[in-house]
Image: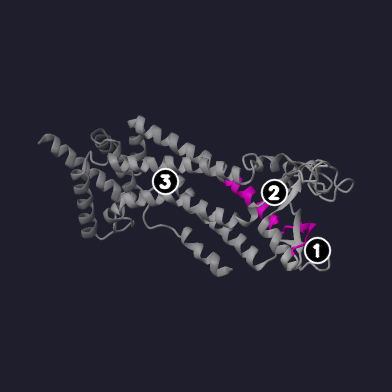
Amino acid sequence: MYSLFGNLKSFVKPQSVTIDSVFCKLHYRVAVMVLLAFSILVTATQHFGDPIKCVPTGASIPTDMLEAWCLIHSTFTVKTAWNLTVGTHVIYPGVDKTPVDAKTERIKTDELVYHTYYLWVPFVLFFMSITFYIPRFIWKTNENGRIKALTAGLNAAIVPPELKENGLNVIVSFFKQNLHNNNGLFATYVSCELLYFVNVILQMYFMNRFLGGAFMSYGWDVITFTDWSPAISDDPFRRVFPTLTKCRFRFGGSSGDFNVHDTLCLLPINILNEKIFVFIWFLYWILLLLTLMAIVYRVITIAVPFSRTLITASHCFPNCRNDVDRIIRNCNVGDWFMLHLLSVNISRSNFSEFIEKYSEKLEMTKIE
């Protein structure tokens, strides 16, 4: 178990180069790590624990066969038994006599709620962790190590003079040669930010379908629910993740005759699932709100040039303000974006020197 979770340490290891915002990191590091950890945890619990325990209704029924059948073919609860008093009318919310039509003697399937999701939880969580990483993969592929190559050796407070001079000259030359040619890369980054936002919305929609329409309000229902008495049936945990359900098992002999057995099944795995999905509900809503804030921030930086000046000036010494103004006036938003990535990857003093050098280059070019 430790070795399984040990593989996730790469998600918390600090990165040597920053090529995106902290909002993006919440998606491809925090969300991916959380979902993978939950997927591993549920998988381990299912394989090394007892995901289901059923009560045999006959001495001739093998317990292992019964439990395997109910695990694979799903268990169910009865809708009409949800609001009955526990301990008086039912033994557990949703657990009552299986409703049968008096005329046809067929089970009223429309009054049953089948619980099939628990087998798919590890796979769903793993798949969702992958989708959280897709925007990061797209952006990293397009960025192609530019910032790492430009800032090599300049992210320390003290850099040998020759190395610093050569490094700053390389950066100045890069920005001069690529002036007004960075909008395409910036557009890719903005698209990835939007993709993070869309991904969360789609995942919430999918999760809601996966849990039978219960996910959207699941966390809120848990927060606002106040009476956790065992006799109360309206427990949001019990409705979405019941720990006691029913199962119909067909058992027969070699002659082909069979009997249908109604049995009770305990689902210990749902004790874990109910906590996991509450955490995921909060995680998704937090990501949705923070990503929306990131998009608003991005709109401001695109629409208001003065905001770009303030952001860049905050990364260098105060005496560089005039140089920053000159650079921002000559740069479009794509150039500024590359400038911003540079500012968060080298030391304040080195970035200030670069601003002075690049400003001089722009002034000389203007004079020429």
Q: Is residue 295 above or below residue 57?
A: above
Q: Secondary structure at mark 2?
A: strand
Extent of the magenta region: 256-283
From the top left corner, tell me how far across and down residue 249 is, in percent. 75, 58
Q: Which residue is mark 1?
A: 56
From the top left corner, tell me how far across and down residue 302 is, in percent. 35, 33
Residue 51 appears anywhere in the view? no
From the top left corner, tell me how far across and down residue 235 is, in percent. 76, 44
Assess whether residue 261 is covered by the magenta stretch: yes
Q: Determine whether label 3 and label 2 are within 8 Å by CB.
A: no
Q: What is the CA distance from the residue labelled 1 to the residue labelled 3? A: 56 Å
* Left or right placement of residue 6 versus residue 212 in this view: left
Q: Which residue is mark 3?
A: 21
Q: What is the CA distance from the residue labelled 1 to the residue labelled 2? A: 20 Å
Q: Determine whether label 1 and label 2 are within 8 Å by CB.
A: no
- Amino acid under label 2? Tyr
